[in-house]
Amino acid sequence: MAFGGFDSQGGPMRPMAEINTTPLVDVMLVLLVIFIITAPLLTHAIRLDLPSAQAPVSTETPETVTVSIDAKEQLFWNDAPLADAQALRERLAGIAQRTPQPELHLRADQQVRYQRIAEVMSAAQSAGVTKIGFVTDPKPSPR
């Protein structure tokens, strides 16, 4: 490895053109040793003997009630037509009192105004229904 010197016998002084890689290799070896030492410590796990318990599988499925709104904004309770909004409020109050409370699935035609959907949601909330879900048709994926 050639280093620059102070003698000018070889002509004018030129900068050193070689990179000294010794410090780089030293640092890399130190990092390698550190990682070799610390790697087993990172995979150390705590050994526990956990208790085991058997619980029966719950076979109870939650009851669902479907409220549908067609394109003419007619209300349906589980596919049975409702006379008016008062009949809907009475039925919502009835399911709100049950334990466990059934889930309310709201289905609406895409032509229905949002105001009508908001009215049904408001009636459900004021009746005390806490589990409301929206039923939609999945969009076909573009190919």
Image (cartoon, rainbow, N blue to C red):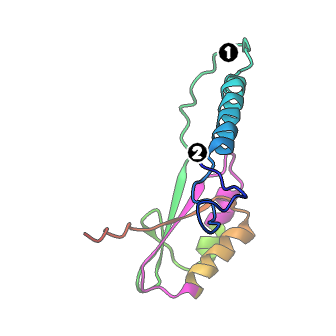
For the record, the magenta segment spans 91-114
Q: Which residue is mark 1?
A: 53
Q: Residue sitting at 38 percent across and 68 percent down? A: 137
Q: Which residue is mark 2?
A: 1
Secondary structure state at the residue bearing disc 1: loop
| Res. 79 image quadrant | bottom left
In the displayed orientation, state which residue is furthest to the left.
143
Question: What kind of residue is marked 1?
Answer: Ala
| Res. 130 image quadrant | bottom right
Chain-order first, disc 2 or disc 1: 2
Disc 2/disc 1 C-alpha distance (Å): 72 Å
Which quadrant of the figure contains the N terminus? top right
Q: Residue sitting at 67 percent across and 15 percent down? A: 53
Secondary structure state at the residue bearing disc 2: loop
Q: Position of residue 15 (x, y in %)?
A: 63, 64
Question: What kind of residue is marked 2?
Answer: Met
| Res. 54 image quadrant | top right
Q: Is residue 120 above or below residue 20?
A: below
Question: Mark number for residue 26?
Answer: none
Dot 1: within a 10 Å radius of its alpha carbon, few (fewer than 14), some, or many (20 or more) residues?
A: few
Q: Position of residue 133 (x, y in %)?
A: 56, 63
